[in-house]
Amino acid sequence: MNTTVRTSPDPTTPLWRAAQVFRLLSYLYAAGFQIASVDDLERPALGWVLFGVLSVWTLACAVAYLHGFGRRPAWVGAEFVVVIGMIWATRLVASEDWIAANQSWPTTLWATNAPISAAILAGPIVGMGTGVAVMAVYAALKGSVSFDFTRNATIVIELAVGLAVGMAAQTARRAHAELERAVRMSAVVAERERLARQVHDGVIQVLALVARRGHEIGGPTAELAALAGEQERALRRLVSVETVRDGADAEFVDLRTPLNRRADDRVVVSVPGTPVLLGAAVVAELDAAVGNVLDNVRAHAGPAARAFVLLEDLGDSVTISVRDDGVGMPPERLAQARSEGRMGISQSIVGRLEALSGSARLTTAPGEGVEWELTVPTHRPEAGPQRG
C-alpha cells in the first residue's frame, strides 16, 4: 500500500527569501568594492580568482536556501567556514597597510550573510554567536579590536542582525506550530461533530423511542426500556463535546454537556447535534436553573412523573424547555408564592434568567403538567444558528 506523507511547510521560508535578497545586495556591494580596490591590492589577479569563488558560492547558497535543501546545519556551517576563509584571504591579496586602512575583503557586509543564515536556522543565540565569531576573525585580521562604536559599529550591527532575525524565525515557528495545532483540533472537533449528528439523528432517537414506548407499554418491556434509556444517556454523554475557544480555559463551553449529564430514568434530554457555545458563567446559571426545575418535578409532580428537556439554538438566543407529565398546578400559584414571601421558584429560576438578561416563562394547569421555557440571548465568537 502506498502512503503519501505530507510534509509541513517551513514557516521561515519568507525569511529565507528575504535573506537571499540581502545576499544579492551584499554581493553587488562586494563586486563594487572589488572593482574600486583591485588596483590597490598586492595580488589583483588572485583577488579576481577569489571573487570568482565568492560569486559561485553566493549563487550556490541562494539556490540552496531558496529551494530548501540548504536549510540544515551542515550547509550553514559550511557557509560560516567559507565566510571566515574569505575574510582571512584578505592577507593573501592585500598588504598590511591596506588591511589596516580598509575593511576586510570581500567586505563585512557580505560576511553578514553567515550570521543571518545561522539565526534563521537556529535562533537568536546562535545568530549572535555566529556574528561574534565572524567579528573575532575580522579583529584577528586587523590585529586589534576597536571599541569606538561612533566610527565602527560593525559588531553592534552583527549582534543586532543575529538577534532580530533569530527572534523573527522563532516567532514564525511558534506561530506555525500553534496554527497547526489549531487546525488539528478543528479537524478533530469537526469529525466528532459529524459523528455526533449521525448518532443523534439515528441511534439516540431510536433508543429514546424504545425507552419511551417501553415505559408506556409496561410489563416485561419495562426492563428493555430501562436498558435502552441507560444506553441513550451513555451515548449522549459520549458524543457531547465541551468546546473551548480562543485558548481561554472555559471561556466558551458547550451547553449540551451539563444538560446531558442530567438525563436519567425519569429525565429525557434532547439536544442539537452540534455544539451550543455560551459563556461559562451563563452555562453554569442555566444548568442550575434546569436543576431547580427538575428538583421541583421530583418533589411535586408525582412519583411517576417524567421530565423532558429540549435545547434549541436559535442563533441570537438559546431556549431550554423543561416539561413534565405530572399533576401540574394552578397558573396563579407562582404569584401566590411570591405574595406569601415564598421566593424559592422566583429566585432560583426566574431570578437566574433575569440576571442573564433572559426570561423564564411558566405554563401549567392542573393535571396537565408543568412547562418552563428558559430563554437567554447569545454572546459568542461565532454567532449563527446551530440547530440539531
Image (tube, grey):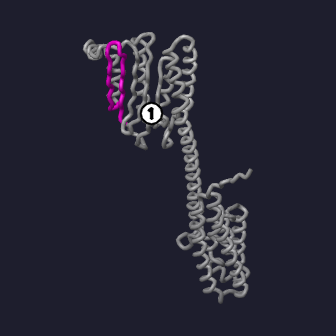
Q: Is residue 283 left or right of residue 12?
A: left
In the picture as drawn, the residue positioned furthest to the bottom comes out as 39
Please state the horizontal and vertical placement of residue 104, each as a whole percent of the image.
Answer: 65, 77
Looking at the image, is 131 positioned above or below residue 31? above
Q: Name the residue under label 1.
A: 280
In the picture as drawn, the residue positioned furthest to the front comes out as 217
Q: Which residue is drawn at 41% across and 23% down?
A: 290
Magenta stretch, main secondary structure class:
strand
* Picture quadrant where residue 237 is located: top right
Looking at the image, is 57 positioned above or below residue 353? below
Badge 1, how many Cα within 10 Å: few under 14, some, many 20+? some
* Picture quadrant where residue 168 is located: bottom right
Q: Is residue 63 left or right of residue 309?
A: right
Q: Is residue 159 visible?
A: no
* Picture quadrant where residue 385 is located: top left
Kindly identify the amino acid type of the residue bearing the numbered disc 1. Ala
Q: What stretch is highlighted in magenta?
A: 356-377
